[in-house]
Amino acid sequence: MFSGDIHLGRSPHRLAASGLIPADYGPEVALIRLVDEAIARRVEAVVLAGDVVDEPRDRFEAFGVLERAARRLSGAGIALYAVAGNHDGDVLPRLAARVEGFRLLGAGGIWERVAVPGAGRVSLLGWSFPTRVVRESPLGLPSLAAALEGRAEEEAVLGVVHGDLDAAESSYAPLSTRALERVPVDGWLLGHVHQPGALSVSRPVGYLGSLVGLDRGEPGLRGPWLVEVRGRGRLSARQLALGPVLWRPLSVDLTGVEPTAEALGEALLDRLVGARAEAPPRVDLIACSVRLEGSPLGRAQPGWWEALSPERLLLPGRPAVAVVAVEDHTSTRRPLAELARIGGPIGVLAGLLERLEGGGPLPEGLDLTLGAARRWPRQVEEAPLPGDRELLLEAGRRMLDRLLAQLEEVR
């Protein structure tokens, strides 16, 4: 069983405002579930692909968690392996030396191949970060070829490494997909990027993803991967949705709804109940980022939805459903073509939005502006920036609504 980034020491963002205890849905709970599942399935090994610990200051918390996990796994005859990533390149080797039954692969930045006990002819090939910053690809190290020497004809080898895939200028062990594919192993299971890759193929090369989502920038199911090896060149992988929290974007169409907190509450409750009905069985909490869309009846003041305070945006039960963010993307009911005929700033902006929505070309001279927006630092919990067209449409709609509100105030 393989797991990507765990980040012991961190807690999920934005949950405390809903009256929830973030640690109840965090990395320690997710790791306990992984150990439970590994023991229940009687796997031969658990393998952690780096960034097991978030920061060196988290060593005390991580030590206790890892010690308990290793003890339980060892008692069930399951080996525990890990490679160090950029977050725990300093601290994980020290913790591994203290925790009995915890084996660090590739310590000191030297590739290492070890046989998995009880798994037949199956080996792990691993490399660990020797420091927090590694600017050269570890695939160019002489120790890689040395580690593969003496491989038996029927021996299946799975590569485990933490690094930045297809990012040549990265400071975090840049890796090339083509270079990985040239290494004579049966698959590569990577840590670093928290979004899981497409690993359910005969020769996987990609990211395991985070063990549990820690913010709304990590939507979708999370959990470890169960990898079954039936021989050299014959393996299968599938993700187990064990993450206690599911971060989910949720759109609410308010077309035809009165722009009041009461009407919004009813529309939102319908969507939250629907989200709960669709939840996988092992999810304890669905954390929703709500996007209000459509054209409400009448015009609301900016921030009208804030009357619903965060502690009220929680649907208790199992799974619980919490609203952790709300963004207002509602707009006027008047067609853009009609507004474009008004003239002045409103008409110019409406005409521009109409062309953008129709697939017309992006306006000239905006390259520098968009580039600056994409380089601007964002909060860790924020979702990625949308594409250029979506970014312009979002900003334009907001500006148009503000101009129309000002026009109505003058009248």
Image (cartoon, rainbow, N blue to C red):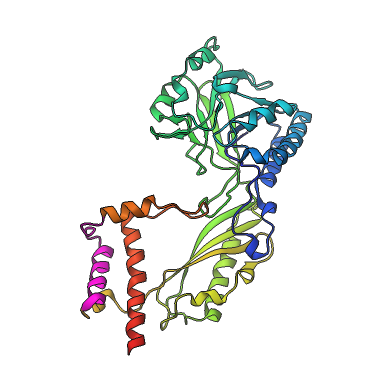
Residue situated in front as seen by the camera: 365 or 65: 365
Q: Give the range drawn in magenta.
A: 344-366
Relative vertical location of residue 114 with respect to residue 211 in this rendering, above or below: above
Image coords of residue 196 (percent x, y): 51, 42
What secondary structure do most residues of the magenta stretch adopt?
helix
* Residue farthest top in this picture: 150
Relative vertical location of residue 361 with respect to residue 158 in this rendering, above or below: below
Locate residue 5: give its quadrant: top right
Image coords of residue 278 (percent x, y): 57, 59
Residue that appears at 36% across and 55% down = 373
* Residue farthest right in this picture: 75
Relative vertical location of residue 395 with respect to residue 243 in this rendering, above or below: below
Q: Is residue 302 left or right of residue 307?
A: left
Q: Does the magenta stretch include residue 18?
A: no
Locate residue 36: give its quadrant: top right
Residue situated in front as seen by the camera: 385 or 95: 95
Residue that appears at 40% across and 76% down = 295
Image coords of residue 410 (percent x, y): 33, 88
Relative vertical location of residue 176 with respect to residue 291 in this rendering, above or below: above
